[in-house]
Image (cartoon, rainbow, N blue to C red):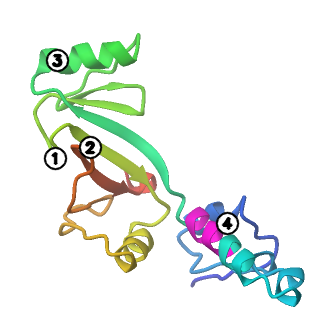
Amino acid sequence: MSFIPTGGINADNIGEYMAFGKVAACGGSWMVPSSLVSQGRFDGIRELTRKAVLALHGFSIHHIAFNCGNEERAAQTAKAFSWEPIMGKGADHAGTWVECMKTDAKGDTGHIAVAVNSIARAKAYMQLRGIQFEEQTQPQVCWLKDEIMGFGLQIVDPKLM
């Protein structure tokens, strides 16, 4: 069963609603206020709707990873970002937002993980804008084909991690 809530939705909480797996869509008059319609201010409606679409995806930086190349450099980098780094098998971490890869991974420099409420929804939205993705091999991660400034990019669903 899926739900489409329409009452009480606004730009500040639409992302929370859309993060719930049983919500298929949200609606509300706040995106199309009657004052903007009566004034013919469709640019204002377009801007409110654009903000709503971005908010419903929940785009936010999840973590940044650096390709350190070896265990020693990974440990040094993690310590530079945190007084209490968490040492791991394939990577060391400085809190939850910096990952220091012990071997080189995707991206010349590393990768940036962007959290979203739904990988499928975010991927479809981004593909409409011409962004291409690699074949998805894990349900919680989807890699973009292109790098930006030496960083690979991935969208992740933190609920699945």
At 40% across and 51% down in the image, what residue appears? 114
The alpha-carbon separation of the residues under discs 2 and 4 comes to 28 Å
- Nearer the observer: mark 1 or 4; the answer is 1
Q: Is residue 67 left or right of residue 22?
A: left
Q: Earlier in the sequence, mark 3 or mark 2?
A: 3
Q: Amino acid at mark 1?
A: Lys
* Picture quadrant where residue 6 is located: bottom right
Q: Which mark is residue 14?
A: 4
At 60% across and 80% down in the image, what residue appears? 25
Q: Earlier in the sequence, mark 2 or mark 4?
A: 4
Q: Which residues are magenta?
A: 49-56
At 32% across and 75% down in the image, what residue appears? 130
Q: Amino acid at mark 3?
A: Arg
Report the number of discs: 4
Q: Is residue 55 left or right of residue 120?
A: right
- Predominant secondary structure, magenta span: helix
Q: Mark 3 highlights which residue?
A: 73
* Picture quadrant where residue 103 is located: top left
x and y percent of residue 145 in the render? 20, 62
Q: Amino acid at mark 2?
A: His
Q: Mark 2 highlights which residue?
A: 111
Secondary structure under tag 1 reads: loop
Q: Nearer the viewer, residue 37 or 112?
A: 37
Q: Mark 1 highlights which residue?
A: 106
x and y percent of residue 35 in the render? 89, 81
Q: Are marks 3 and 2 in contact (CB under 8 Å)?
A: no
Q: Earlier in the sequence, mark 2 or mark 1?
A: 1
Q: Are marks 2 and 1 in contact (CB under 8 Å)?
A: yes
Image quadrant occupied by the N terminus? bottom right
